[in-house]
Image (cartoon, rainbow, N blue to C red):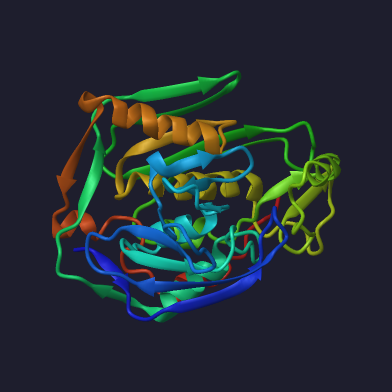
């Protein structure tokens, strides 16, 4: 069945790119609401921005959604990943600025707050988006693909010149609490050489060593180093989880990304929905729903695991 939060959760911080302080509250919502953002600071225009694939307006370094009145919210991918990974299907996110707070650069603060608040069943049936045939999009050497599978799987591969990242790949079945146990605390990352360029372009104004993994060649500059083995590719999978959540329902299918980013994943969803033969809505049985992302997760699943760091 569909779920929402049992109680509201609140966050405060700064936007990664705009550098502006923001307050954000995730509130319970009725069945079939889906996920939507409410810009409480907007006057004279519709402040409601639905978190859907067809509302994505910009996705170069983050995912930005926008409504018909030009009201937008950016860097939504980490909180969207947290909601999907915790199995929250309906929520209203009230925010008083243009960008979701970056917090520590991962989904972990969102996940811990969501699980602590608890989920409430809404008594309404839950449906999934089943992928019926492979759909693929490419941009240069990058590609993203969705293909049929009986559960949600994410596979990703990256290749960076900096030895601190290098070539990494990972495949996970996202059933139950896999997102919470394996991906949620992996942080956004960048190369030191890119920081000055982004800030000169008016981006990453709220970035710091505390909310991103910054690398320079074979060195990790952020205090404490890496949190996990292959943290970079895990974060790319986290981003994909959040961007795929804009489909509006859990996905029964396998996502594969090779050097893919936010824009390419959104192009993939657009290509999927443009082909009626490639997908269908499918009611979820109770047994299958219990194997979907987020089913049965607890605060114990949020305990950091000791892993060998690459």
Between 20 and 225, the one lying in front of the other is 20
Between 288 and 37, the one lying in front of the other is 37
Which residue lies at the image location 56% right of the left edge and 68% below the top edge?
Answer: 96
Note whether 274 is above or below 218 in the view shown. Answer: above
Quadrant in the picture for the N terminus: bottom left
Task: Locate residue 216, reporting x and y percent.
Answer: 85, 43
Residue 170 in view in this figure: no
Note whether 238 is above or below 304 in the view shown. Answer: above
Task: Locate residue 47, reporting x and y percent.
Answer: 44, 60
Task: Locate residue 226, reporting x and y percent.
Answer: 72, 56
Pick out the residue farthest to the front.
Answer: 44
Tell me if 174 is positioned left or right of 66 in this view: left
Tell me if 107 is positioned left or right of 159 in this view: left
Between 64 and 171, the one lying in front of the other is 64
Between 3 and 70, the one lying in front of the other is 70
Q: Name the quadrant containing residue 223.
A: bottom right
Count the numbered circles shown: 0
Q: Name the quadrant containing residue 305.
A: bottom right
Pick out the residue farthest to the top.
Answer: 140
Tell me if 19 is positioned left or right of 24 in this view: right
Residue 229 in view in this figure: yes
Task: Locate residue 45, reporting x and y percent.
Answer: 45, 57
Which residue lies at the image location 69% right of the left edge and 56% below the top edge?
Answer: 16
């Amino acid at each position: 069945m569909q779920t929402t939060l049992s109680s509201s959760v609140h966050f405060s911080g700064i936007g990664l790119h705009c550098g502006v302080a923001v307050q954000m509250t995730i509130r319970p919502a009725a069945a079939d609401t889906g996920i939507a953002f409410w810009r409480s600071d907007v006057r004279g225009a519709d402040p409601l921005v639905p978190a859907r694939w067809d509302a994505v307006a910009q996705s170069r370094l983050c995912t930005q959604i926008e409504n018909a009145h030009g009201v937008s919210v950016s860097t939504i991918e980490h909180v969207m990943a947290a909601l999907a990974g915790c199995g929250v299907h309906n929520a209203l996110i009230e925010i008083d600025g243009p960008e979701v707070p970056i917090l520590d650069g991962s989904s972990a603060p969102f996940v811990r707050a969501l699980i602590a608040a608890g989920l409430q069943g809404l008594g309404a049936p839950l449906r999934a988006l089943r992928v019926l045939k492979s759909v693929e999009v490419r941009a240069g050497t990058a590609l993203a693909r969705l293909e049929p599978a009986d559960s949600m799987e994410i596979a990703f591969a990256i290749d960076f010149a900096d030895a601190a990242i290098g070539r990494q790949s990972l495949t996970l079945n996202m059933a139950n609490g896999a997102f919470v146990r394996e991906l949620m605390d992996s942080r956004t990352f960048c190369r030191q050489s890119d920081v000055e360029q982004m800030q000169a372009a008016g981006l990453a104004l709220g970035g710091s060593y505390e909310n991103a993994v910054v690398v320079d060649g074979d060195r990790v500059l952020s205090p404490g180093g890496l949190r996990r083995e292959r943290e970079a590719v895990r974060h790319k999978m986290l981003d994909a989880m959040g961007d795929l959540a804009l489909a509006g329902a859990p996905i029964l299918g396998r996502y594969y990304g090779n050097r893919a980013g936010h824009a390419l994943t959104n192009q993939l969803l657009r290509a999927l929905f443009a082909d009626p033969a490639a997908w269908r809505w499918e009611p979820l049985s109770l047994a299958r729903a219990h194997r979907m992302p987020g089913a049965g997760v607890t605060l114990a699943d949020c305990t950091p695991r000791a892993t060998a760091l690459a």
